[in-house]
Image (cartoon, rainbow, N blue to C red):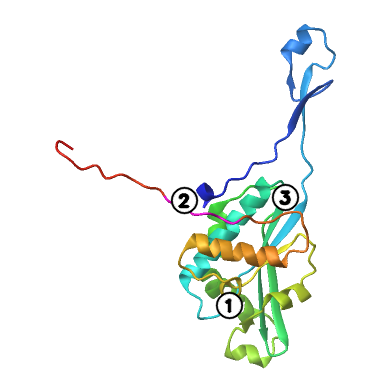
Amino acid sequence: MEKYIKLSEKKSRQYNWYVGYAPDVKAYLEGNPLSMLNKTKPARKQINIYFNATYNCYTKTEQIYNRGVIALNIVEILEKLGFSVNLNIFNMAVSDSQVHYAVFRLKNTTERMNIKKLYFPMCHNSWLRRLIFRLIEVTPHAESSWLNGYGSACDESMVRSIIDLEPNDIVIVEPDEMNIKGKDLIDDANSMFDCINKKRKTEDFELPHIKKVKRMTKNLMGKGV
């Protein structure tokens, strides 16, 4: 998706000062006391992304994969826009009147993206089937309704009522609720961006639509070709 997204990263501004990370030889030779190069880093607002690993049993593998890939790209987009991002994956499922909620921090604001680390929990269905289901099975004090299944995925309104969210925070729920079909990745990305933009409570950012690029190639035919 990177080739379709054109964003400029907020860069630091370089200036001369008494102390810094490197000498300015020209300023030093001229006798300028401000002979060291320094940088100002732009202030970065923090965004927490909450990614619900739970989805209904009819969800396709392609939907799970597309949702995870798009979510990883959202992290990169926001960091290029100058935000610091915490990435959290959680399970929130409900059975009768009881909610099972568990959250894991996959990336904090000081870490760089590690695709090898993030791919399995965000893009592969075994994270839910192998780990989250087992976590539910060994959770104490669960009601008897959990004996017959693993509950149903909570919708976004319930998630927001349980998690204490900041205005900039993003919630990514199951693929069907975010209109992810699992066919065309770009179409799914735009659908997911629309869902997030409608739910956000701040004007600090807006996820841009991705335009498909059509490339025309000439098929040269003739003698000697």
Question: Residue at 61% of width from left, 90% of height from top?
Answer: 147
Q: Amino acid at mark 1?
A: Phe
Which mark is in front, 1 or 3? 3
Q: Quadrant of residue 167?
A: bottom right
Q: Quadrant of residue 203?
A: bottom right
Q: Secondary structure at mark 3?
A: strand
Above or below for 170 versus 213: below
Question: Residue at 72% of width from left, 76% of height from top?
Answer: 157
Report the Cα–Cα distance between label 1 and label 3.
31 Å
In the image shown, does 89 or 224 lie closer to the viewer? 224
Report the Cα–Cα distance between label 2 and label 1.
41 Å
Q: Is residue 183 magenta?
A: no
Label 2–label 3 contact, CB within 8 A? no
The C terminus appears in which quarter of the rendering?
top left
Q: Secondary structure at mark 2?
A: loop
Relative image position of residue 31 (x, y in whole percent)? 82, 8
Which residue position is annotated with label 3?
84
Which residue position is annotated with label 2?
213
- Could you tell me what secondary structure mostly forms the magenta stretch? loop
